[in-house]
Amino acid sequence: MLTTLVILLLLHFVVAAFVMGKSMAQNGFLFRVTNLFALGVGLCLVLAWGYWSTSKSNANTLFEINFLRLCVVSLIGFMSFVLLRYSIHYLDGDKLRGRYFRSLLITLLCVTVVVLSNHLILFWVSWVGISLSLHRLLVFYPNRPRAALAAHKKFILARLAESALLGAFICIYLTTGSLQVNEILEFYSTYTGAITALDQTAAILLAVVALIKCAQLPVHGWLMQVVESPTPVSALLHAGIINLGGFLVMLFGALVLRVEAAKWLLLIVAGITTLLAALIMTTRISLKVRLAWSTSAQMGLMLVECALGLYELALLHLLAHSAYKAHAFLNASQWVHEDLTRRMSKQVEPPFWQWFGALGVAMGLVYGAASSIGYQGPVSIWALMIGALTVWLALRFEAQVLRSYWKILGIALVLLVVYSVQKWLLHFMVALPDELRTQAFSASDVWLLTIVITLAIVNYLLYYRAHLPLVQKLSRLLYAGLYLDEWMTRLTILLWPVQLPRTKKQKYLAKHHYTPNLEELK
């Protein structure tokens, strides 16, 4: 029964790929039918999981359904429906839209198989299929040099990540003797012996794959440059595919979190990426590039949450970020008006009493929320909530009417209640052994706490002390992205040269054999 439902879901993407490759005018009815069919299959999957969650037989040789997989595949189904509807109008009249829709649906098909796969070979083959079909979408406009260079860098990094993933799976198979993901996870969940060299190698390789997939520094540059691809492709990439790194760590967390080297690799690289990408984002003018830097920072924070053992928070982060980022890219045209309005409005620095008052209120609200759900774990993640809430309150504590203060506090309280309830519920759904969860004020908790405090201080200086010479130097350095992508681009071209397409001006000059004279060169 499980295999039948999954095959029906995958069959929808195959049928839709055939339909969308034809004329929209002739197959609009079939397109609607296939999407209703997908919703029906999705409902069947939900009902099936509700039945199998009460028994032990919720997996077979090829596929598995549990709460984590169901959440992610439901997100994929919702995103695919939105992206397909948006793309019909976005590419109306484009001669290559048939190729676009086929590549898009093949990508969604491969992502779905990865999320539901219970077999290492099927998982790896589908993972490779994602990057190959995505590459065709990234070079949908092949005459753009920046898009071609970004796709080339992504192509190389994808091959590196796939090789590392294959190596990790080989190590896992040699240790466990099984290719079934559920059997592997059960083995590591109940394993009490010493961690072998093969286990350590597999965990480190999985961490490397997640860091590459989530575009962490210094292999982040391609993510900022592929915004020249069609807007729906950017939405698909930032709202779906890039989250697979976090999904991989959550899926194999029973192994990754038992290896200190793998855990600290995630904490250090993803933590530094979170700090730097969040600061670099504030220096960007292009809205899409700013969103891309935001994605890199958010993915870094999600990986840090995974390394801390906060899987319920990482899953909540994955779902919320996907919905937000898809809306942000598909609604990018409205951001121009909103950004101009914000820049033209009067920017007033809150006085110190507002900052300290907001900090006190935020600390009190967060402490009450953490106590009400009986939270026990790292405090750094709540410190991040305190920082965000402090900024939000300080910028609004200028009202002179008592009723306005109560309204602001009410909104903050509602946000905290919703956040705490979701975190509390997901904690029971995404079970994780207590020994794998980071304790309060441990080394990893202090590391993230240091990052949060540094981010708050530097962000304040960039916004309200930009006139200081040292801050201006830092701002210029951040605007250059610390020159990390430039070095990676040079290394990429050195290892694997690429022939970039020529611009119209270059083609014209080459066609007419034009050579500029000395005066023009001056």
Image (tube, rainbow, N blue to C red):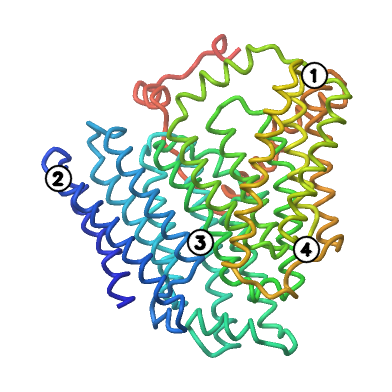
Report which quarter residue 199 is drawn in.
bottom right
- In the rendered image, residue 68, in percent from the top left (x then y), is placed at 51, 65
- In the rendered image, residue 157, in percent from the top left (x then y), is placed at 55, 56
CB atoms at circles 2 and 1 under 8 Å apart? no
At label 1, the amino acid type is Glu
CB atoms at circles 3 and 1 under 8 Å apart? no
Q: Is residue 268 above or below residue 221?
A: below
At label 4, the amino acid type is Gln
| Neighbours of disc 4 within 10 Å: few (<14), some (14-19), many (20+) | few
Mark earlier in primary sequence (2, 4):
2
Q: CA distance from mark 2 to mark 4?
A: 53 Å
Q: Which mark is residue 296?
A: none
Mark earlier in primary sequence (2, 1):
2
| Figure quadrant of the C terminus | top right
Query: Which residue was labeled with disc 3?
Result: 159
Q: Nearer the viewer, mark 3 or mark 4?
A: 4
Report which quarter residue 341 is drawn in.
top right
319 with respect to 387 (left or right): left
Q: CA distance from mark 3 to mark 1?
A: 48 Å
- Which residue is the extreme one toward the left? 26
Query: Which residue was labeled with disc 2?
Result: 29
